[in-house]
Image (tube, rainbow, N blue to C red):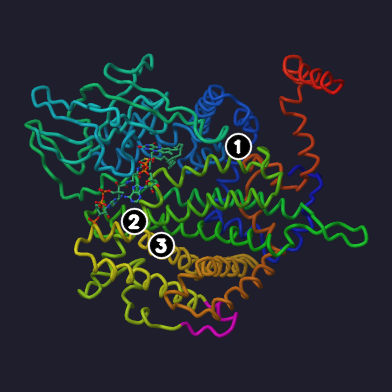
Amino acid sequence: MEVGAPDYLAGERQTAEFDVESMKVTWAGSRHALEVSDRMARLVASDPVFRKDNRVMLSRKELFKNTLRKAAHAWKRIVELRLTEEEASRVRFFVDEPAFTDLHWGMFVPAIKGQGTEEQQQKWLPLAYKMQIIGCYAQTELGHGSNVQGLETTATFDPKTDEFIIHSPTLTSSKWWPGGLGKVSTHAVAYARLIVDGQEHGVHGFIVQLRSLDDHMPLPGITVGDIGMKFGSGAYNSMDNGVLRFDNVRIPRDQMLMRVLQVTREGKVIQSDVPRQLIYGTMVFVRQTIVADASCALSRAVCIATRYSAVRRQFGSQNGGPETQVIDYKTQQSRLFPLLASAYAFRFVSEWLKSLYTDVTEKLQRGEFSTLPEAHACTAGLKSITTSATADAIEECRKLCGGHGYLANSGLPELFAVYVPACTYEGDNTVLLLQVARFLVKTVSQLGSGKVPVGTTAYMGRARHLIQCKSNVQSAEDWLNPQVVVEAFEARSLRMSVACAENLAKFPNPEEGFAQLAADLVEAAAAHCQLIVVTKFFEKLQQDIPGKGVKKQLQILSSVYALYILHKHLGDFLSTGSITPKQGALANDQLRSLYSKIRPNAVALVDAFNYTDHYLSSVLGRYDGNVYPTLYEEAWKDPLNDSVVPDGYQEYIRPLLKQQIRNARL
Ligand SMILES: CC/C=C\C/C=C\C/C=C\C/C=C\C/C=C\C/C=C\CCCCC(=O)SCCNC(=O)CCNC(=O)[C@H](O)C(C)(C)COP(=O)(O)OP(=O)(O)OC[C@H]1O[C@@H](n2cnc3c(N)ncnc32)[C@H](O)[C@@H]1OP(=O)(O)O
Ligand SMILES: Cc1cc2nc3c(=O)[nH]c(=O)nc-3n(C[C@H](O)[C@H](O)[C@H](O)COP(=O)(O)OP(=O)(O)OC[C@H]3O[C@@H](n4cnc5c(N)ncnc54)[C@H](O)[C@@H]3O)c2cc1C
């Protein structure tokens, strides 16, 4: 905010019962992370190249070219200022525009790192790090996305020339969707079925050059282009999601990523001791980052809706005084505050998931693979529930802002359009929950065998207790006890998984049973993932959290998150007998009282996200709350208002009006 400018939300900020600066540190993860973030936010906001207020008005071509300009400028600044990786990734965050660079850094580089041999990494990574080559991740095809084993592209070894022949045998085998592919990437990690000596060896990644490094023209045998406009204006259309066909394209043998499986000069296929699933490792990495993205997108929407709800007034004027702030309506609070709590919950679970991922990666380096299934289940499941909740929440925030939320300059329509594909990319959310369900059913089925479940399924080791325990909640106050809450969530989750396992056992063919019970399995998987989020929020509170009143606010938010989920899924808790209807009603009583505790802190709690006005790009979410004059000014900037009488008046409006007049005279 400019020095001396009026702050229409100052009153709201004065009622905060905690130290906002300390909460900013907790949200950012550390004082250092906050400092870096703050500096990079200002760097981006003060640079005219990164302007984004006109984005929804641009044609696709203009938008795309502008994105190229921003990406090139960002890279120039990163190199000039010698920014660290952490700083560079904050620059990407605040530039706030999907671009080919996301796939280059986020998938192409990690695929080579995770699936390439030492030699391959040494050859390709320096080129990629300097952006002397630009890569994408070409897995999905027109006919196959979720079913990776069903991909049709082939990579056939030719021992005569020591090459692989990459080919798209059918229309449905055309690569379809990869970001950065359509117009920019010079290379791809393309996934194809490996065929050696007429035998198939599953799907593997191959580094394929697509375009000339001299004139950017597609190489012989490559057909490549953009797949067309996507949902919404602006939004994901800055990305060149592409289509790609291979017509017997030859690549050297050493361009197959060979950490998992090697093909020798003689055409021998050698399986290393690394599990086959490591071929899916890049997806595990990105799913983990997507959970962190969910907390960012959600907190952004909630920040806009909270500030605007404090500015907006409707009804309730007493003796000509001001009307009621809509944030004071209990319905507004019961829709908004759980989303605020969810933003914090997703933030902390993403922190935990990142540490789990780092730990598993270190173990993989040492040749320990036992934690891979849990890492897969956690990343897949949390990606699924956090993105689904965030997509729904952004739309709810739009509605919480009434009519003005529908204006592009509220920032919410574009945020929604850019965010919703997260429910689909990197694994459709239902497909991913089915993976979690497989993991849970397997864990349950091993309970009797003496194998002790660990990590996020450790609670299943107490199945005997959880299957019959009764919650001893007797008052609304009891629901503030994390142990009580966690036990109710554990009982619900365990009982849902066990019920699924019991029902599955009734089918002679387990796969048929899995298919028939898929809807129940998905619900059991979601219950397990919600338990993880709740638990990790409570565990965060065990840490030392400095700053006046900060921990207290987080305790309130953790209870709101847990009791909101309980209230929303009350049917599960009641039907599994994890709690009684009376206890469910007490949870709801507690939730109401927690909302009143959040109310004086709401604006400060969203200030703690530390978002600049440039990043929010929302008239409704402005830090200073100066909404109405800005809405009014912005309206006049619309190109339609460039002329008082619109283009087309002479051709289409005038004749109509004349005709009406004639008719009226008749
Ligand atoms: C210097 C820096 C400068 C600037 C910075 C600039 C930029 C920013 C940088 C970074 C940004 C970071 C990240 C963001 C990047 C991009 C994000 C933006 C956009 C997103 C792009 C989206 C890209 C995509 O969508 S890529 C395509 C994704 N596709 C999918 O997800 C497909 C989903 N399908 C599957 O995963 C699988 O096919 C399946 C799991 C559903 C089924 O597979 P399969 O049939 O083989 O399996 P099963 O038989 O069911 O299972 C076999 C066993 O394997 C286990 N399994 C399955 N998957 C995994 C896994 N991933 N890991 C481990 N194990 C796995 C499964 O459990 C089975 O085990 P079991 O024991 O045998 O039961
Ligand atoms: C914006 C965007 C960017 C993308 N970027 C990339 C990229 O860079 N690289 C890349 O390779 N791919 C990319 N993709 C592709 C993406 O990964 C796939 O779209 C995604 O994995 C879903 O696969 P699908 O499209 O085949 O969906 P489908 O599997 O066809 O899903 C359609 C419906 O079928 C259901 N379904 C499917 N299988 C099952 C099942 N077994 N049981 C029950 N229900 C099922 C799903 O739940 C869904 O409702 C991108 C997609 C989008 C939208």
Which percent across, then down, holds residue 297? 55, 48
Q: What residue type is labelled 3?
A: Glu
In percent of the image, x 26 and y 41: which residue is there? 115
Q: Between residues 592 and 207, which one lies in front from this camera angle?
A: 592
Q: What residue type is labelled 1?
A: Leu
Which percent across, then down, holds residue 337? 63, 61
Q: Mark 2 points at which residue?
A: 434
Which percent across, then down, holds residue 448? 22, 75
Q: Tell me the tag on residue 43.
A: 1
Disc 2 residue: CB within 8 Å of ligand 2:
yes
Q: Tell me the tag on residue 1.
A: none
Q: Give the range drawn in magenta.
A: 471-481
Quadrant housing residue 58: top right
The reply to whether the C-beta atoms of the residues labelled 3 and 2 are less than 8 Å apart is: no
The residue mark sitting in front, 3 or 1, is 3
- Secondary element at image label 3: helix
In percent of the image, x 23 and y 70: which residue is there? 446
Q: Between residues 56 and 34, which one lies in front from this camera angle?
A: 56
Q: Mark 3 points at which residue?
A: 523
In percent of the image, x 67 and y 62: which residue is there? 333
- Secondary element at image label 2: helix
The reply to whether the C-beta atoms of the residues labelled 2 and 1 are less than 8 Å apart is: no
Q: Is residue 465 above or below residue 1?
A: below
Q: What residue type is labelled 2?
A: Leu
> In the displayed structure, does residue 410 sit left or right of residue 421?
right
Q: In this view, does 513 lie above or below 483?
A: above
How far separated are the C-alphas under marks 3 and 1? 44 Å
Q: Between residues 108 and 359, which one lies in front from this camera angle?
A: 108
